[in-house]
Image (cartoon, rainbow, N blue to C red):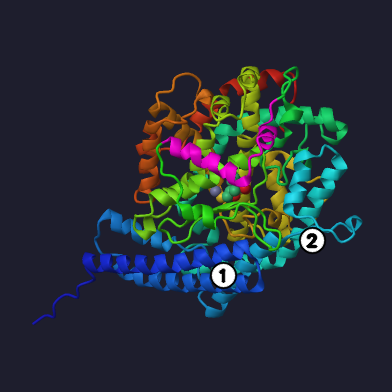
Amino acid sequence: MAAPAPTGPTEAEARAFIDQTELQLRALWSNQQRVQFVQNTHITHDTETLNAQASEQVMDFLAKKIKEASKYESVQVAPELRRKFDLLRLAQDLPAPPEAAERAELATLAAAMETAYGKGKVCPPKLGGKCLTLDDLSRTLAQSRNYDELLEAWKGWHDQARALRGTYARYVNLANRGAQAFGFSDFGTMWRTRYDMPPEAFAAEVERLWQQVQPLYESLHCYTRMKLRQAYGNRVPETGPIPAHVLGNMWAQDWGNLFTMVAPAGKAQTYSLKQRLLQKKVTPTGLVKMGEGFFTSLGLDPLPDTFWQRSMFVRPRDAEVVCHASAWDITLKGDLRIKMCIEIDEENFQTVHHELGHDYYYWYYRDLPTLFQQGANDGFHEGIGDTIALSITPKYLKQIGLMDASQEAQLDDVSFLLRDALDRVAFLPFGKVIDQWRWDVFSGKVKPSEYNKAWWELRQKYQGIVPPVTRTEAEFDPGAKYHVPANVPYARYFLARILQFQFHRALCQAAGHTGPLHKCSVYGNKAAGDKLKALLAMGASKPWPDALEAVTGTCTMDAGPMLEYFQPLQAWLTEQNAGRTCGW
Ligand code: X8Z
Ligand code: ZN
């Protein structure tokens, strides 16, 4: 008699495996979050070591579970359960290399790079032992109009990052070994596989969106360059790329700080949000309260008391910290925090809304299964707070007492949109470049001996900027940007920049807004709030095109709404640039 055919595992067994894995993951992730939060708010040798240990633990656990999961590959299971298996394979921030010693090394390197970035300082001899932090240097970049002073601050911060070069190359090596152990050709491919489509299709998608917005960026670049030339003379070329240090920001990623310099001639710019906030003696906590106030006006919950008790809002006097802003849910059950070094200005006002967007996402999906506690894709997560910030219109500022009626009347559409574009439009090529570079580094197309060369080629090609002084392979300029040493993917911010306008238009429609999109604020509108809550509560339970369709009615990412929003500015820029050679 023939032996009965061997039967594979059942759907029930597959489900039990995932349920158990999710429970264990929640505990491990929560522990890791807690340790990381402590490290980020109090860098010492010990907190860094604890962080490395926690990462290693998560790495080991996920590697084991992903291997076990292959048993269930051919089991017929419900789509929702299959999605969890797919998400499990992609859940590693750091993919475990095969050897235990390599895993420990990768975890140690990653923790060390993040803390090194956090501790980064510049100590110019002329200050006689006094050192400058990134906050200090950024203030100079934002406020100074002295070419050489700007250069010194820019060069100081970029030069100190050279210490990370060797460690970074080793990290690339180990992370690739990890990614390959799970069937990805390299770590960058693993990153690009997180978008419910093949990795090549995702790269093409980013390129397609960039092509949509490139003309708008080029118009802004052309106009800004002309204005900068008026201020800095021949040191800013008439037709070539702009030196990277005169754009008001350490990485030339958003240019809002140039507003008073580039504002339309003849329109006196008397209004300053920063001045108004200072005048009203708004504290860092007060700034966060204002952000919360927007979300609650939409009918979303107030932040829990523990948020106010456990967050870090200012740079402590007596500890090394990672100041780069971030948002947390330590327990994955609503222990929300933000960590920021708030200074009272417009940029921080925007960032507070950005971070609270993350916290509200965490909050509304906190009851979902662990693997679904993510954004529909990571661009959604980055785009929520920014969507809300798009509703910070003059009308809204007046409503909350941050602008007078006379100031509102004076502010014309072009000035308002120009201010906004200096941040949101200027960012677009930067949002693309960071991972364009890392994808090439991880794939091996760019070798360590060409790190800086490749970096500046991309910066010039997409952003139309050049380093203000010669850079060589002795330096490591990508390391001067937080997300590179901190192992945080960046394409998400590019997507967010596009998505936030799609979300904004959808919320405005729900609120019954008519008229130009840039005039819309959904402040106080519960219908818009309901739409937002529904999106947040979906987490990653469905592929992102479904989530996008549920909010906007379309399942493709599209820069159309962004172009619509900036249309009056685009028309004005075209007039201003008439007769000039744009591009670089
Ligand atoms: O890193 C951030 C947030 C934390 S997720 C502050 N952003 C990017 C950056 O600063 O480079 C927000 C905009 C882009
Ligand atoms: Zn963010």
* 297 part of magenta stretch: yes
Hey, what amino acid is under mark 2? Ala
Hey, what amino acid is under mark 1? Asn
Q: Is residue 447 above or below residue 418?
A: below
Label 1: which secondary element: helix
459 vs 205, left or right, is: right
Magenta stretch in the rendered image: 271-298
Q: Nearer the viewer, mark 1 or mark 2?
A: 1
- What is the number of the mark on residue 474? 2
Q: Is residue 571 visible?
A: no
Q: Magenta stretch mostly in which secondary structure? A: helix
Which residue lies at the image location 82% right of the left edge and 30% below the top edge? 229
The residue wearing badge 1 is 51
Report if the beta carbon of the residue with label 1 is closer than 8 angstroms to ligand 1. no
419 vs 522, left or right, is: right
Q: Is residue 318 above or below residue 383?
A: below
Give x and y (percent) for residue 383.
50, 42
Q: Quadrant of the C terminus?
A: top right
Within the image, what quadrant is residue 224 found in? top right
Q: Sort mark 2 into few (<14), some (14-19) or many (20+) by Cα contacts within 10 Å.
A: few
Q: Is residue 278 above or below residue 168?
A: above
Which residue lies at the image location 65% right of the left edge and 18% below the top edge? 410
Q: How many marks?
A: 2
508 vs 68, left or right, is: right
Give x and y (percent) for residue 522.
46, 30
Which residue lies at the image location 78% right of the left edge and 46% below the top edge? 467
Give x and y (percent) for residue 100.
52, 79
Give x and y (percent) for residue 302.
44, 45
